[in-house]
């Protein structure tokens, strides 16, 4: 089974590793789509690291078999499906994707055989990039 995981992967941390370990456990091949810088800017925030560096970091993780950079924001993520050919799309516990709408769009595009699964989160309070940045800023303020 081929699994696809999608994310920003800015400031790689334990939450990312946990997500990818769980995604890999769903099949025997994991392809990770690292969000394009322009997509991150349009949908979230200014990335701390660029997509080429984020791709390189994710490639070094044990659960990962292949990594590609996603489309720019004017191109649908669904257009990448023929390149990856997944059986399963693994969503992170905190990704703001609605499973039902993804399943519906897959059905409309003729990819209804692809399963969409949300994986569990890491039970750690620093499991996200924004949480880590906030903690660093807090520690910095405390030192002053």
Image (cartoon, rainbow, N blue to C red):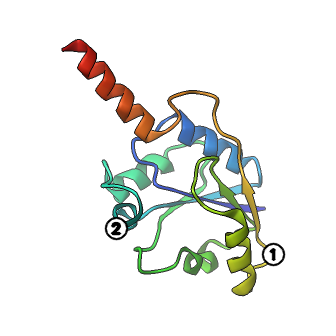
Q: Which element type, helix, strand or loop, lies under badge 2?
A: helix
Q: Name the residue under label 2.
A: 38
Residue at (62, 50) in percent of width and height: 92
> In the image, residue 65 lies at what x, y percent?
61, 54
Spatial separation of the CA atoms under disc 1 and disc 2: 30 Å
Mark 1 or mark 2, earlier in chain: 2
139 displayed left or right of 2: left
Residue at (50, 29) in percent of width and height: 126
Question: From what the image shows, is residue 59 above or below residue 83?
Answer: above
In the rendered image, the quadrant that contains the N terminus is bottom right
Residue at (78, 78) in percent of width and height: 112
2 displayed left or right of 49: right
Residue extending farthest to the right is 113
Q: Mark 1 points at which residue?
A: 113
Image quarter of residue 14: top right
Number of disc labels: 2
């Amino acid at each position: 089974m081929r699994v696809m995981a999608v994310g920003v992967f800015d400031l790689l941390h334990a939450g990312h590793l946990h997500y990818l370990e769980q995604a890999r456990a769903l099949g025997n091949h994991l392809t990770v789509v690292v969000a394009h810088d322009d997509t991150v800017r349009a949908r979230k925030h200014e990335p701390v690291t660029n997509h080429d560096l984020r791709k390189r970091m994710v490639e070094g993780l044990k659960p990962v078999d292949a990594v590609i950079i996603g489309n720019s924001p004017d191109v649908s993520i669904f257009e990448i499906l023929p390149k990856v050919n997944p059986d399963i799309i693994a969503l992170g516990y905190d990704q703001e994707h609605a499973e039902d709408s993804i399943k519906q769009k897959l059905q409309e595009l003729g990819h209804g055989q692809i399963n969409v699964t949300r994986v569990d989160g890491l039970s750690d309070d620093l499991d996200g990039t924004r949480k880590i940045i906030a903690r660093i800023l807090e520690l910095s303020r405390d030192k002053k």
